[in-house]
Amino acid sequence: MQLIKLKTRVERLAFKIDAPTHLLPTYHIPRGDALPHIEYDTTGQFHFVVSERGQELKRKTTTEENEILYWIFSSITYYMATAYELKHRNRNQDCKRMIYSKQEVLLSLIDPKWGQRIHLEHQYHIEQHPFDDFMFLRMDYTDQLKEQGYTELEIRNLVAKKYPKKSPKTLRYRSTTTLPERS
């Protein structure tokens, strides 16, 4: 009964953000393709499970319906934001900038608190793994130098000199997300 109720809520919230149905989780039965499935046990716990080819990669457990919904939609909106970034790629910035911003907007459409929560998670991730706005330029320059016959060591040194790992823009993250007003 709980999973039927949860599935109904998931479908209703997915409609709000026009989420593709293939991104929605399954219930009790894994697809095995690294998209989540949801379990509910006799102790009243929801399990958010990710498995691929028969191997469980992630399992998170909660008794809170709102928490499981957040986990489900964090996953769905991440896939949606990644697809959006691929279609609108800006080769002059780290792709995470657009992905994070789009995911924050999508989650905020469902629940403004979720948008704020994912923003904080993104900030933490960026502190651990700063943006690299030279990533694509570095890749293009590497290819260019390879075609010109430079050795791997020469390429590494030339690329590092022209496009250092930390650009000034990597130091701070300000979301371009406009969160919806609280009602």
Image (cartoon, rainbow, N blue to C red):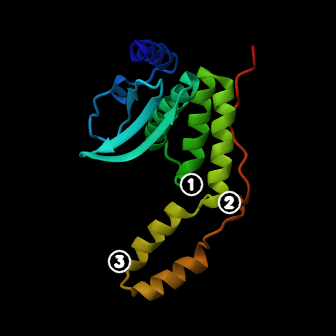
Q: Residues within 10 Å of mark 3 (few under 14, many from 20)?
A: few
In the rendered view of the protein, which quadrant contains the N terminus?
Answer: top left
Q: Residue at x 56, y 49 (%)?
A: 96
Q: Residues within 10 Å of mark 1 (few under 14, many from 20)?
A: some
Tell me the kind of residue under disc 3.
Answer: Glu
The label shown at residue 170 is: 2
Q: For mark 1, give the secondary structure.
A: loop
Q: Which residue is mark 1?
A: 94
Residue 30, compared with residue 170, is above or below; it is above
Label 1 or label 3, whichever lies nearer to me, is 1
The quadrant where residue 25 appears: top left
Task: Mark yes or no: residue 5 visible.
Answer: yes
- For the residues labelled 3 and 2, the Cα–Cα distance comes to 29 Å
Q: Is residue 173 above or below residue 83?
A: below
Contact flag, marks 1 and 3 (Cβ < 8 Å): no
Q: Is residue 87 left or right of residue 177?
A: left
Q: Residues within 10 Å of mark 2 (few under 14, many from 20)?
A: some
- Give, as a three-letter code, the residue at label 1: Asp
User: Do labels 1 and 2 touch, CB within 8 Å?
Assistant: yes
Work out whether residue 94 or residue 108 is closer to the camera in this orientation and state it.
108
Sequence-wise, the earlier of marks 1 and 3 is 1
**Residue drawn at (37%, 41%), measured in percent from left and top?**
50
- Give the Cα distance between marks 1 and 2: 9 Å
Residue 177 shows up from this direction? no
Residue 161 in percent (x, y) is at 60, 80
